[in-house]
Image (cartoon, rainbow, N blue to C red):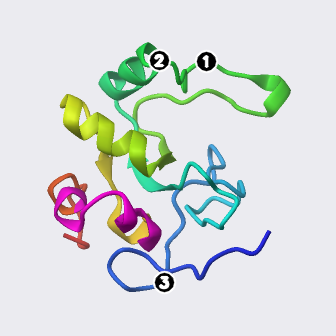
């Protein structure tokens, strides 16, 4: 698998999203992507209880640990590389988590408009 260039939605170098828990399509801690990443795991989001409950409700349980897959389960405050389409769906449902723009891959822009990402950006210097 050939990883795409690590560029964020701000045009800079893609920053890490989370090493604890280790996230990303490549489980390298960043929201890197490639052609084979059909889910586009490119949006670095800060988990909330509301989002985790909604995600479980719609069939993607991110909070239950799965030791067999070395997945600890997520809790509020954890950062995780979400599928861009799932993030956009959460925006439309009114339960989107905040995103870290510097850690969100530019390929997310093929699915999520920049204005939506900015409107949901975490408070930080990147805003």
Q: Is residue 14 magenta?
A: no
Please tell me which of labels 3 and 1 falls first in the chain: 3
Residue 45 lies, in percent from the top left, at 40, 48
Q: Which residue is mark 3?
A: 13
Please tell me which of labels 3 and 2 falls first in the chain: 3
Q: Residue at x 40, y 46 (%)?
A: 85
- The circle drawn on residue 3 is none
Residue 2 lies, in percent from the top left, at 75, 75
Q: Closer to us: mark 2 or mark 1? A: 2
Specify few, some or many for label 3: CA neighbours under 10 Å numbering under 14, 14-19, or 20 or more.
some
Q: Which residue is mark 2?
A: 56
Rounded to the nearest angstrom, the CA distance separating label 3 from label 2 is 32 Å
Residue 83 lies, in percent from the top left, at 49, 47
Q: Closer to us: mark 3 or mark 2? A: 2
Element carrying mark 3: loop
Residue 127 lies, in percent from the top left, at 19, 69
Element carrying mark 2: helix
Please tell me which of labels 2 and 1 falls first in the chain: 2
Q: Is residue 95 left or right of residue 31?
A: left
Q: Residue at x 41, y 85 (%)?
A: 12
Q: Which residue is mark 1?
A: 64
Image quarter of the N terminus: bottom right
> What residue span does the magenta drawing correspond to?
106-117
Rounded to the nearest angstrom, the CA distance separating label 2 from label 1 is 9 Å
Q: Residue at x 73, y 22 (%)?
A: 66
| Residue 46 appears in view | no
Specify few, some or many for label 2: CA neighbours under 10 Å numbering under 14, 14-19, or 20 or more.
few
- The correct choice, above or below, for 45 with respect to 56 in the image is below
Do labels 2 and 1 touch, CB within 8 Å?
yes
């Amino acid at each position: 698998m050939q990883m795409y260039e690590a560029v964020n939605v701000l045009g800079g170098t893609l920053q890490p999203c989370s090493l604890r828990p280790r996230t990303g399509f490549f489980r390298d801690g960043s929201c890197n992507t490639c052609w084979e990443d059909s889910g586009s795991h490119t949006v670095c989001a800060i988990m909330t209880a509301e989002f985790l409950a909604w995600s479980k409700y719609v069939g993607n349980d991110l909070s239950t640990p799965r030791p067999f897959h070395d997945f600890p389960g997520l809790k509020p405050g954890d950062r995780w590389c979400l599928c861009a389409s799932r993030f956009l769906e959460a925006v439309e449902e009114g339960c989107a988590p905040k995103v870290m723009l510097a850690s969100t891959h530019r390929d997310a822009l093929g699915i999520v408009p920049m204005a939506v990402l900015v409107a949901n950006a975490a408070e930080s210097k990147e805003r």
